[in-house]
Image (cartoon, grey):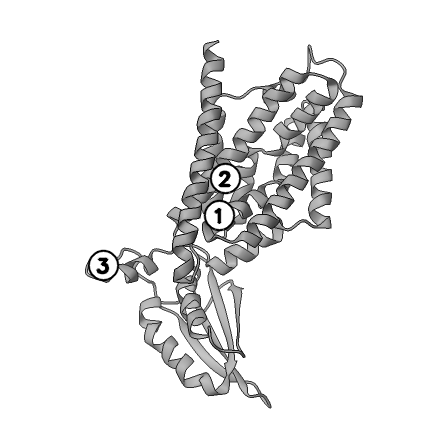
Amino acid sequence: MPLRVIEIIAPHEDKDEVYKTLEEHRPNEGYVFWTSAHEGENSLTFRVIMDVKESENVLDRLENFFTWKDKYRIIVLPVEATIPRLKSIEEIPDPKEAPEKQEKKLKNRLSREELYEDVLDTSVLSRSYILLIIFSSIVAVIGLLKNNVAIIIGAMVLAPLLGPNVGLSLATTLGDDDLAKASSKTLVSGIMLAFAITFIAGTFLVTDISNGPSELMARASTDFSDIILAIVSGSAGIISFTLGVPTSLVGVMVALSLLPPLSACGLFLGAGYISHALGAATLFFANIICLNLSGVVSFLLLGVQPLPWWKREKARITALRIIGVWGVLLAILSALLFFDLLS
């Protein structure tokens, strides 16, 4: 796991309290820390270096400590390495320990704050996001029409629709209405823009699909293997995301592939092939449903939850309700596929 440095800028009068808090928990968390004063200012900086899997425990404690303070700032920075190495922490909990202490040792992931910031970058509607949608839609159209798998993979790797879906899953888990609204707005805007571009392309570029490209035709239908693939890929993507290993997401993007079926739907509908467009739309929404369902479940299983205790139960209930909604939609979709196979 990677390392993190937590910088705590606090008023000088809180030095003893902060030092005592950090010193009390240092044996359990295995971190090291030091203090430096700001020349000419009534403040000082604590720097704590630790394994990333322990950072949320420390951040939660510090945030609780500073809840009623006015002048403080906590900054989290990535670290490549430290010499000497940090003491290794035993990851298997002692059954004799208190349950809350065992739970803290099991957070083998990025902290809640880091997850939130990473998601926020791709969940807010921006000029860069719009440009990515435009470019990836054009790449997807070219790849589908030229029947070129490499070009289609290029559109998958850009994956602008993946970010707001992950943001929506995290917002559901944390009970964050603002993030949910921002992610939903970004997702809907991206879908509408990508569909408009591909619909226009289908109107002018697609004339006859009787001998159409196999990559395009492959996205005109959905089966149960697509649903299984979407669920597994979504869970793998969330786990990779929480571990801070973004490069592994490339394989997940290729497997899940939100944009190609949406692009195929636009191409088919623009060309007037309604039944094929419905097939591609089914595949697209199956991926959306499975990604969000597996995303919320994965975040819950990884212990992602709000910090304030009074928000946790509310967020848990909301998450279970949303899981129920996505589950019902998946059941309806599965039933439709089942009866379609029988007919």
Looking at the image, tell me whether mark 1 or mark 2 is earlier in sequence order: 1
Q: Quadrant of the N terminus?
A: bottom left
Residue 279, horizontal then vertical, whole percent? 59, 20
Type of amino acid at the residue the image marks with label 2: Asn
Horizontal side of residue 257 vs 240, given as left or right: right
Badge number at residue 320: none
Q: Of discs 3 and 2, which sits in the foreground? A: 2
Secondary structure category for the residue under label 1: helix
Spot occupied by residue 3 in the image (x, y as percentages of width and height): 46, 62
Residue 111, horizontal then vertical, whole percent: 46, 59
Q: Amino acid at mark 3?
A: Asp
Label 2: which residue?
292
Question: Which quadrant would residue 139 be assigned to in this image?
Answer: top right
Q: Are marks 1 and 2 in contact (CB under 8 Å)?
A: yes
Q: Nearer the viewer, mark 1 or mark 3?
A: 1
Query: Which residue is under mark 3?
Result: 94
- Kindly report the distance in space between the C-alpha atoms of the residues bearing marks 3 and 2: 34 Å
